[in-house]
Amino acid sequence: MFTVRLQKRECTDERRIEDFLARAETGFLGLTDDGLPYVVPLNFVWMKKRNAFYFHGAQEGRKMRAMEGGSSGCLTVSESYGTIPDPIPAKTDTAYMSVMSFGQMELVRDLDEATEAMQAMLDKYAPGYYDTPLAKAHIERYRSSMGSATAVFKLVQQFRSAKENKQRGPS
């Protein structure tokens, strides 16, 4: 679909990509809302077996409106690992890893799938905090402080690319 312009930075090591997605905390979901770009930072979980990224949020609002009708989306996950100094200013760089995933947005209507995704998010962001698995009833009944029900939605991945610039050791 797309190619990485700077080929030496392309990461094709699936294990590195999977490990990165398992620990990275924030993704930036890009959508289109009324013909305008709309990018929102959010927590996510990558579920390889479903080839999808999962998110949650209020059932109403701009994000949900932008996803109506199975729109396309792009999730970008990036982390900086620091500056790579060089005696030549133009060669000073940044160590980083990033993944861009493109696909179709879908509201998760299946309660079992939604509960599995929310449990995976709890396991990622609050490991060991809860001593019992998340109940399906919690997903059905939970309301935000503004009274909105929680929606679970996903980006079903169709294509992704990854780039990295590794931190160099001492010379």
Image: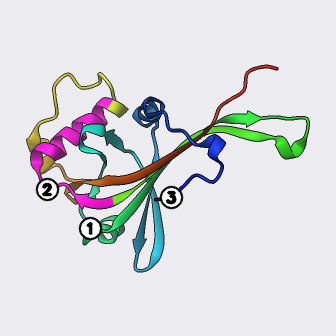
In the picture as drawn, the residue positioned furthest to the bottom comes out as: 34
Disc on the earlier residue, 1 or 2: 1
In the picture as drawn, the residue positioned furthest to the left comes out as: 137
Magenta span of residues = 104-123
Q: Residue 91 in the image: x percent, y percent?
A: 83, 42
**Front tag of 1 and 2:** 1
In the picture as drawn, the residue positioned furthest to the right comes out as: 87
The quarter of the picture where the C terminus appears is top right
Disc on the earlier residue, 2 or 3: 3
Residue type beneath disc 1: Gly
Residue 106 on the magenta segment: yes
Q: Which residue is mark 3?
A: 2
**Front tag of 2 and 3:** 3
* Secondary structure mostly seen in the magenta stretch: helix
Q: Residue 104 in the image: x percent, y percent?
A: 31, 61
Q: Which residue is mark 2?
A: 109
Residue type beneath disc 3: Phe
Residue type beneath disc 2: Arg
- Mark 3: which secondary structure? loop
Q: Residue 35 in the image: x percent, y percent?
A: 44, 79
Q: Left or right: 5 with respect to 153?
A: right
Q: Which residue is mark 1?
A: 70
Disc on the earlier residue, 1 or 3: 3
Residue 129 on the magenta segment: no
Q: Residues within 10 Å of mark 1 (few under 14, many from 20)?
A: few
